Image (tube, rainbow, N blue to C red):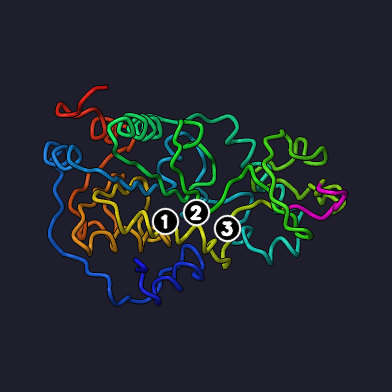
Amino acid sequence: MIFLPFHTRRLVTQVYFGLKPGRQKGIAVAMARPSSNLAEFREVFAKAKHIAVITGAGVSAESGVPTFRGSGGFWRKWQAQHLATPEAFARNPSRVWEFYHYRREVVLTKSPNPAHLAIAECESRLSKQGRKVVVITQNIDELHRKAGTRNLFEIHGSLFRTRCNTCGSLKESYKSPICPALEGKGAPEPEATDAAIPVDDLPRCEENDCRGLLRPNVVWFGETLDSTLLGEVEKELETCDLCLVVGTSSVVYPAAVFAPQVAARGVPVAEFNMESTPATTGFTFHFQGPCGTTLPPALARHETELIS
């Protein structure tokens, strides 16, 4: 059984992230007002055996990670959609690497916040009770990993992995900077000028003396998601009995498809966000405010849990 219908699967794997598609058939959205009663949510949480947590940029923003979204989301004079594309990398790999070098360096200074930690603690605790928690994140900062999350699907990739444009080799790299030529580069201010680093001095592949140009192993605007990874995510979503949507606007795909699909089959969905989203009315619960504040009490040990 494929959880996402064909037209939705194609939408998820091929859409330019951040763009809103037209109205989709097959996604039933109820128009009732969701509950903000924490006690009611806790009763549902106590009975759940398989919890899927979908997270977005709002979780990382509470750790001080720039989101590069909205009217103020610029690096120098560019927004992310002008830099995070294969075309931008082909035209000016030095500028794109400066952008990602800046992001890597910022993230290396950040720590998981209470929302990250609450999710990781919940996963560890419930696993001892034979219950499952999986995290499906759009974030590329690895803060869920740093918090201790194990069942993690990073659907947009990671800032700390590279892919060779020549041989396709995938590698992890936490070096700071990732190559000597990027030392001290990547200043985000509008008046900063491009470093114009020669392409031979940008990160290069060291696999079998390949020396091909490396790129960040993240999903750029216009690129497809990994179909194998997407299939694994679908399996989790079609079997979960509780879904949490945390710190995401619900307009960025594929998260905008995932949660309404889960809700459409009658599974409770709880949204934790700073504000209501276009999908809010289709969910069972909505808790407004910083997820670092709202999520920990929601996921804390329930009085009915057995302690091993």
Mark earlier in primary sequence (2, 1) = 2
Type of the residue with mark 1: Val
Say which quadrant the N terminus sits in: bottom left
Indicate which label's residue lies in the foreground, 3 or 2.
2
State the image coordinates of residue 113 (x, y, percent, origin top left): 42, 30
Q: Is 298 on the left-hand or right-hand side of 253?
A: left
Q: Rounded to the nearest whole Å, what is the CA distance between mark 3 and mark 1?
A: 16 Å
Indicate which label's residue lies in the foreground, 2 or 1.
1
Type of the residue with mark 3: Val
Secondary structure at badge 1 equals helix
Type of the residue with mark 2: Ile
Residue holding disc 2: 155
State the image coordinates of residue 74 (x, y, percent, origin top left): 56, 51
Residue contact between numbered discs 3 and 2, judged by CB atoms under 8 Å: yes
Q: Nearer the viewer, residue 100 or 122?
A: 122
Q: Is residue 33 above or below residue 304?
A: below
Q: Which residues are magenta?
A: 207-214
Q: Residues within 10 Å of mark 1 (few under 14, many from 20)?
A: many
Say which quadrant the C terminus sits in: top left
Q: Is residue 262 above or below residue 201?
A: below
Q: Rounded to the nearest whole Å, what is the CA distance between mark 2 and mark 1?
A: 9 Å
Residue contact between numbered discs 2 and 1, judged by CB atoms under 8 Å: yes
Seen at 70% across and 53% down, the residue is 163
* Residue 219 marker: 3
Seen at 17% across and 65% down, the residue is 30
Q: Is 121 on the left-hand or right-hand side of 280?
A: right
Q: Residues within 10 Å of mark 3 (few under 14, many from 20)?
A: many
Secondary structure at badge 3 equals loop
Is residue 5 located in the magenta-colored stretch of the structure?
no
Indicate which label's residue lies in the foreground, 3 or 1.
1
Residue holding disc 1: 233
